[in-house]
């Protein structure tokens, strides 16, 4: 009998695990890049991205309750369509998204680190991925606890940015904050939303630790909901403060945007925010390594790919082979691709996955009406989720082809 993964995660750890991935995946690294796309319409871009991600998050809540398993999305698609090739393909698509996301975060880590010590970007990124890979291989409890601690640090950093920019919040004007920048137009809002969407991904990674979660049918949906609500509130406040304190074009040019916001707002050194930005990137990498390795493990455990990836270390109770393969691919991504390209590729893959997840729930709800006490959502939610994600993918592909 194959050794099973250890159930060590309760609601607080799962919530902080997901929240840390959502926060680390974007606001510290990409808020400046979104401002470069949307200008003063940055808040609108975040609102649009939040709406699209939120619809799919609700679909994930129901599916996670119905089918709490590693390789989650592959399992959802298999339950809906019964096509092994589709399940395996989407599993590898999620792995690719995790690899590109972690590679982008490793570069974000290097950007913040450069504010303290000058090192070649590739060297700093590779060193981070190797160290975090060892932590992830050591055990899920250690990995999730480390991620939870970093998450608390990230929240404190965002709260500090909001505090130092509180004067801009006092003078908040909805009509001004929610207008389209004439220099960038509506296409800038959508382009910014495509990048900002990267900042909201993370809840879909939470479901891949379902087999290591206590009472997953209840814990997982609640953790998704709480982490999404908290991250949304923090994002909107920080995005508004950042673009109020710093001109969008200046923000776009910074490799450590929130450190720049702190310095400009206070006139003091931003070393503390720089350290938190480093922590945020580290946290995101931890979660992506766990996610990618668990999907590989899940696919192998279902018998869909080579069984070697399902090997669980007797001592650590973690999929060490799968973890090593994922870290190696992340290192290659960090070396070969620039930050914005990695973020856009991640968003494109994840949006496509979200569309399929929503379609899966539509079909599952049509043929399986039993609830068994799980949290359910109205059918209109996955319908809107599938439509909005598909439209954003098509818009971005159109923009790419016209360049």
Image (cartoon, rainbow, N blue to C red):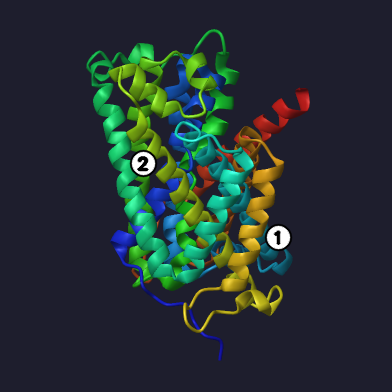
**Label 1 vs 2, first from the N-terminus:** 1
Specify the quadrant that holds the C terminus: top right
Residue at 53%, 8% in the rendered image: 182
Residue beneath disc 2: 231
Q: Is residue 380 above or below residue 89?
A: above
* Residue 214 x/y as whole percent: 34, 72
- Specify whether 272 is left or right of 67: left
Residue at 50%, 49% in the rendered image: 382
Q: Is residue 183 above or below residue 116?
A: above
- Specify whether 188 is left or right of 202: right
Residue beneath disc 1: 89
Foreground: 318 or 114?
Answer: 114
> What's the CA distance linking mark 1 and mark 2?
30 Å
Q: Secondary structure at mark 1?
A: helix
- Mark 2 surroundings within 10 Å by alpha-carbon count, few (fewer than 14), some (14 through 19), many (20 or more): many
Residues at marks 1 and 2 touching, judged by CB atoms closer than 8 Å: no
Foreground: 401 or 4?
Answer: 4
**In this rendering, does residue 109 appear at all?**
yes
């Amino acid at each position: 009998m194959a050794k099973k993964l250890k159930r060590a995660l309760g609601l607080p750890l799962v919530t902080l695990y997901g929240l840390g991935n959502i926060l680390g995946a974007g606001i510290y690294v990409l808020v400046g890049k979104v401002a470069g796309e949307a200008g003063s319409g940055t808040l609108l871009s975040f609102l649009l991205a939040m709406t699209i991600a939120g619809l799919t998050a609700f679909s994930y809540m129901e599916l996670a309750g119905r089918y709490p398993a590693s390789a989650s999305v592959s399992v959802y698609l298999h339950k809906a369509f019964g096509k092994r090739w589709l399940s395996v393909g989407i599993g590898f698509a999620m792995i690719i998204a995790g690899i590109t996301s972690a590679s982008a975060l490793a570069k974000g880590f290097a950007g913040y680190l450069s504010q303290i010590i000058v090192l070649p970007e590739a060297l700093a990124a590779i060193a981070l991925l190797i160290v975090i890979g060892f932590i992830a291989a050591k055990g899920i409890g250690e990995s999730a606890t480390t991620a939870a601690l970093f998450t608390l640090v990230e929240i404190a950093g965002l709260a500090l940015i909001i505090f130092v920019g509180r004067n801009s919040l006092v003078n908040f004007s909805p009509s001004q904050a929610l207008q389209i920048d004439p220099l960038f137009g509506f296409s800038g809002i959508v382009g910014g939303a495509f990048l900002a969407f990267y900042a909201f991904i993370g809840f879909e990674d939470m479901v891949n630790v379902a087999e290591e979660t206590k009472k997953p049918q209840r814990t997982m949906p609640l953790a998704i909901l709480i982490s999404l609500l908290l991250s949304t509130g923090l994002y909107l406040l920080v995005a508004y403060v950042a673009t109020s304190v710093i001109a969008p074009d200046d923000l776009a040019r910074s490799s450590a945007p929130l450190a720049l916001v702190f310095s400009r707002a206070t006139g003091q050194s931003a070393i503390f925010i720089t350290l938190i930005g480093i922590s945020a990137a580290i946290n995101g990498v931890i979660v992506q390594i766990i996610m990618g390795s668990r999907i590989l493990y899940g696919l192998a455990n279902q018998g869909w790919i080579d069984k070697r990836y399902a090997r669980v270390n007797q001592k650590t109770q973690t999929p060490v082979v799968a973890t090593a393969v994922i870290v190696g691919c992340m290192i290659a991504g960090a070396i070969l691709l620039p930050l914005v390209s990695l973020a856009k590729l991640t968003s494109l893959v994840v949006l496509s996955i979200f569309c399929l997840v929503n379609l899966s729930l539509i079909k599952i709800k049509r043929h399986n009406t039993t609830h068994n006490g799980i949290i359910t959502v109205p059918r209109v939610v996955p319908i809107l989720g599938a439509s909005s994600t598909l439209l954003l993918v098509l818009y971005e592909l159109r923009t790419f082809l016209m360049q």
